[in-house]
Amino acid sequence: MNPYGNKKHGHHGTLTYKRWKSMRQRCAKTNTGKAKYYSEKGIGITDRWAKFENFLADMGECPDVTMTLERMDNAMGYGPDNCRWATQSEQNKNRSHCIELTLNGETLILSEWAKRLNISPNLLRQRIFKLGWSVEKALTTEKKARIDA
């Protein structure tokens, strides 16, 4: 007998099983609060993943507690061609509201550029959206030093 008490697949209670169950709950039509991000946007789960055993075969075990299931393309649903194990930090870069900026062939999200340039994300956002600067000007103009009186 397995330690989790499930004779079918033996993974009930494991981290991988919890991630699978959480995915199913997010996409359920009756979920509370998250429906607007998942079921109401048409985000579903491939029929194959209705069975945990198929999910496990496609994804493998969840590597560790810092990893969760990420959809690489947020417009698509959950399935083996669109999912991977990712850290929260990696997932934060893949949110639909993230703003990607490209300079000299390098693309980063706005917050990553701000960190690299040692300026606040708000300053960078203002340069582009409020002042109407080009991405190049916004990313290459140095932050003005404060002049103390």
Image (cartoon, rainbow, N blue to C red):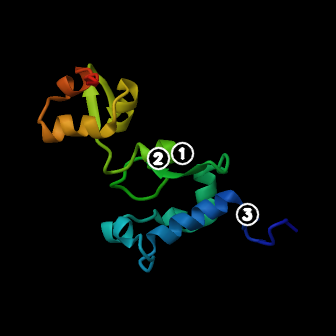
Q: From the viewer's perspective, is 67 left or right of 70?
A: right
**Element assignment for label 3:** loop
Where is residue 19 shown, x and y percent of the image? 60, 60
The amino acid pointed to by label 3 is His
Q: Is residue 51 above or below residue 141?
A: below
Query: How dense is the environment of label 2, judged by Cα within 10 Å: few (below 14), some, or many (20 and up)?
Result: some
Q: Which mark is residue 86?
A: 1
Find disc 2 in the rendering and name its residue: 91
Q: Left or right: where does residue 79 sit relative to residue 56?
A: left
Numbered mark located on residue 11 in the image: 3
Mark 1, Cα crowd under 10 Å, few <14 / some 14-19 / many 20+, is some
Instruction: From the top left corner, tell me how far across and down residue 83 is, in percent.
Output: 48, 50
Tell me the distance, in whole angstroms, between the alpha carbons under discs 2 and 3. Answer: 25 Å
In the rendered image, the vertical position of residue 61 relative to residue 53, given as above or below: above
User: How far across and how far down the image is residue 118, in percent?
Assistant: 38, 27
Give residue 7's mark.
Answer: none
Residue placed most toward the observer, 102 or 17: 102
Residue 102: x %, y % from top left:
26, 28
Q: Tell me which numbered mark, 3 or 1, is placed earlier along the sequence.
A: 3
Q: Which of marks 3 and 1 is in front?
A: 1
Residue at 18% over, 24% down: 137
- Spatial CA span between label 3 and label 1: 21 Å
Marks 1/2 in contact by CB < 8 Å: the verdict is yes
Which residue does the image show at 11% across and 36% down from the upper left?
132
Q: Is residue 19 left or right of residue 38?
A: right
Please state which amino acid type lies under the numbered disc 2: Gln
